[in-house]
Image (tube, coloured by chain):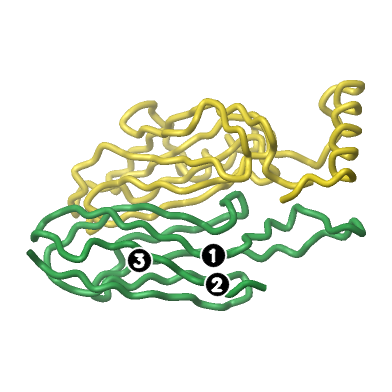
Chain colours: A green, B yellow
């Protein structure tokens, strides 16, 4: 299987109090469990079931993901920045694997 | 997903069956009632009001595998009054749940975008729950040319 690779886009810097937009994409097949292989056997479900974004240890945004989300799940959301710090992004797979990424942001 | 000759044949056979027997063929799709039941569960007994939340989805989605969908809710996003969560449902998919976004006052705005799968032409419903207990919803019909469940 292709390697799961998270990609995140966070602005390099923001003014205090700014609301910034964060875009994330992670390569993942998001096998829904509804499809069947050539022999007609159902392909087991394997999806990323949750995502969390933390800023300096505090949760900013999270979501519970169902099989109805497309392959290579894309998420765009906002965050309010009051101080410089680190955004931490975590994706949790059905099989228990955890994928994560971190991005720094500076104050203008 | 690639369209092979075999899958094309299955598709057209399926289409013929649907034409012949109405909508009895195909996998067990969720009904609109199922979706409504989930929404009632999510709302926790509060009657959802239309407005305040806006759901953006294309009117016609050519490919049901990736349908861009975004929600945004009008809210001050303060500690006392913010949008706690927004759930998206699709009433014609095998499972009506699509995604649940959980916001915090640190989100700044209650808006998010993602891409979803739609099995067929159906209603997409977004429901928002605020920290004050209010529940809002918005609904859009999306026409799907090629379904996204790869049956």
| Depth check, front residue: A2 or B21 | A2
Q: Which residue is mark 3?
A: A53
- Residue A38 position in % (x across, y down): 88, 57
| Depth check, front residue: A30 or B126 | A30
Number of marks in picture: 3
Marked residue chain, label 1: A
In the rendered image, the vertical position of residue B1 relative to residue A101, given as above or below: above
Determine the residue positioned at 26% across, 70% down. A55
Q: Which mark is residue A51?
A: none
Q: CA distance from mark 1 to mark 2?
A: 5 Å
Crowdedness near tag 3: few (<14), some (14–19) or many (≥20) residues, C-alpha within 10 Å? many
- Residue A29 position in % (x across, y down): 63, 62
Q: Are marks 3 and 1 in contact (CB under 8 Å)?
A: no
- Residue B100 position in % (x across, y down): 47, 51
Q: Quadrant of residue A2?
A: bottom right
Q: Quadrant of residue B50?
A: top left
Q: Are marks 1 and 2 in contact (CB under 8 Å)?
A: yes
Crowdedness near tag 1: few (<14), some (14–19) or many (≥20) residues, C-alpha within 10 Å? some
In the rendered image, the vertical position of residue A8 relative to residue B70, given as above or below: below
Q: Earlier in the sequence, mark 1 or mark 2?
A: 2
Q: Which residue is mark 2?
A: A4
């Amino acid at each position: 299987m292709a390697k799961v690779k998270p990609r995140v886009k966070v602005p390099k810097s923001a003014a205090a109090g700014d609301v910034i937009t964060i875009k994330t994409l992670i390569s993942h097949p998001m096998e829904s469990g509804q499809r069947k292989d050539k022999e007609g056997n159902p392909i087991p479900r394997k999806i990323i079931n949750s995502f969390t974004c933390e800023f300096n240890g505090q949760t900013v945004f999270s979501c519970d993901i169902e099989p109805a989300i497309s392959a290579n799940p894309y998420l765009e959301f906002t965050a309010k920045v009051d101080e410089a710090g680190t955004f931490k992004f975590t994706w949790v797979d059905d099989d228990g694997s955890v994928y994560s990424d971190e991005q720094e942001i500076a104050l203008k | 997903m690639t369209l092979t000759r075999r899958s094309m044949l299955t598709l057209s056979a399926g289409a013929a069956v649907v034409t012949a027997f109405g909508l009895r063929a195909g996998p067990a799709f969720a009904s609109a009632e199922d979706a409504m039941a989930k929404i009632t569960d999510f709302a926790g007994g509060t009657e959802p009001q239309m407005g305040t939340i806006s759901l953006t989805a294309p009117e016609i989605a050519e490919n049901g595998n990736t349908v861009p969908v975004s929600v945004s809710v009008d809210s001050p996003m303060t500690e006392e009054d913010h949008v706690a969560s927004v759930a998206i449902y699709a009433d014609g998919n095998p499972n009506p749940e699509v995604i649940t976004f959980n916001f915090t006052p640190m989100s700044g705005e209650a808006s998010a975008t993602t891409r979803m799968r739609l099995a067929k032409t159906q209603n997409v419903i977004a429901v928002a729950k605020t920290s004050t207990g209010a529940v809002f919803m918005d609904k859009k019909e999306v026409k799907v040319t090629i379904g996204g469940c790869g049956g």
